[in-house]
Image (cartoon, coloured by chain):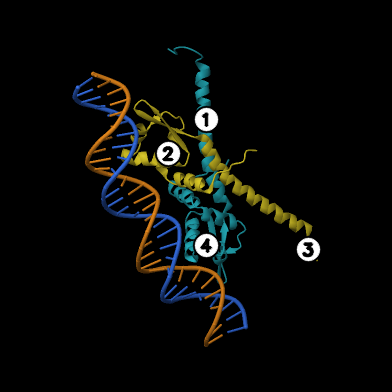
Chain colours: A cyan, B yellow, C blue, D orange
Amino acid sequence: MVVVSLSPERVDLVFHALADATRRDIVEAAMGGELSVSALGRRYPISLTAVQKHVAVLERAGLVRRRRLGREQLVCTDMDAVRDASRLLDRLEVLWRDRLDRFASVLADEPAGDPT
Amino acid sequence: MVVVSLSPERVDLVFHALADATRRDIVEAAMGGELSVSALGRRYPISLTAVQKHVAVLERAGLVRRRRLGREQLVCTDMDAVRDASRLLDRLEVLWRDRLDRFASVLADEPAGDPT
DNA sequence: GTAACCTACAACCTAATGGTTGTAGTATCG
DNA sequence: CGATACTACAACCATTAGGTTGTAGGTTAC
């Protein structure tokens, strides 16, 4: 089993990056890894600078990487980072299930009445 | 299969709510559903008002519910909402896998050379 | 009833977000 | 070379976030 160990600060960045519809769309669009920043810019009714900032936010969160190709800057989604984020939430569910199990076992050990 | 259909605005709220370590801790602590706001307040080195605001953010995102019990306000995490958030990220992975599959099948149909 | 406790809310402050325009550097094309 | 396309960055603006203090309303305990 792979242990997901992201620092809390990094988790902050990841969730914050995903808390914007434009950025989530960029993540989706850049899964192919062949879109330049200006190509992304044409998809949205905002300035190119705004798109650059969105990409920068995604990059700080590690959800996206950039590589230079000639005069273009190709954006590429890091699917591992997406998976890590998903597992962070799975972990909460596991925690929850564990607590339910422990609670259930306590009930089983003491069917009715005072334990002392 | 259950279709997760959260509005984009709701998704914004959910991810934004999770983009803070204190709030993530509240979600985890309130999985039992028996913590009052003031009990939560004792866990963190910030004012009670700040904790109230965090709980309000979580509530707006639907990650947490509150119910009044006497003079207390008991906070309870909605695990279904956590699951929904997790599935949103899973969906990205599925999309990604689909694209890889489609790409692979194109390669299989046209092993080498011009299709026309 | 009064004191203590839990909550609610308004007002305020500072820093960060998300957006803009403008200017300038760097590649590619003709 | 000059023109065009892609990117980078500074400066600015409005709004929101996250925090504070202070005041006030219900609830429980004594």
Q: Amino acid at mark 3?
A: Ala
- Residue under label 2, please give it: B25
Figure check: A87 above or below A25: above
- Residue under label 1, please give it: A98
Task: Pinpoint residue C22: horizontal percent, then vertical percent.
Answer: 41, 74
Instruction: Name the mark nearer the viewer: 2 or 4.
Output: 4
Q: Amino acid at mark 1?
A: Asp
- Residue under label 4, please give it: A45
Q: CA distance from mark 2 to mark 1?
A: 17 Å
Protein chain holding label 1: A
Task: Pinpoint residue B98: horizontal percent, then vertical percent.
Answer: 67, 50
Q: Quadrant of the N terminus of chain B?
A: top right
Tell me, yes or no, whether dots 4 and 1 are on the same chain: yes
Taking the image as shown, residue A110 lies to the left or right of residue C13, namely right
Tell me, yes or no, whether dots 2 and 3 are on the same chain: yes
Q: CA distance from mark 2 to mark 3?
A: 54 Å
Figure check: A86 above or below D26: below
Q: Residue at x 49, y 65 (%)?
A: A47
Q: Residue at x 55, y 44 (%)?
A: B6
Protein chain holding label 4: A
Q: Residue at x 47, y 65 (%)?
A: A49
Tell me, yes or no, whether dots 2 and 4 are on the same chain: no
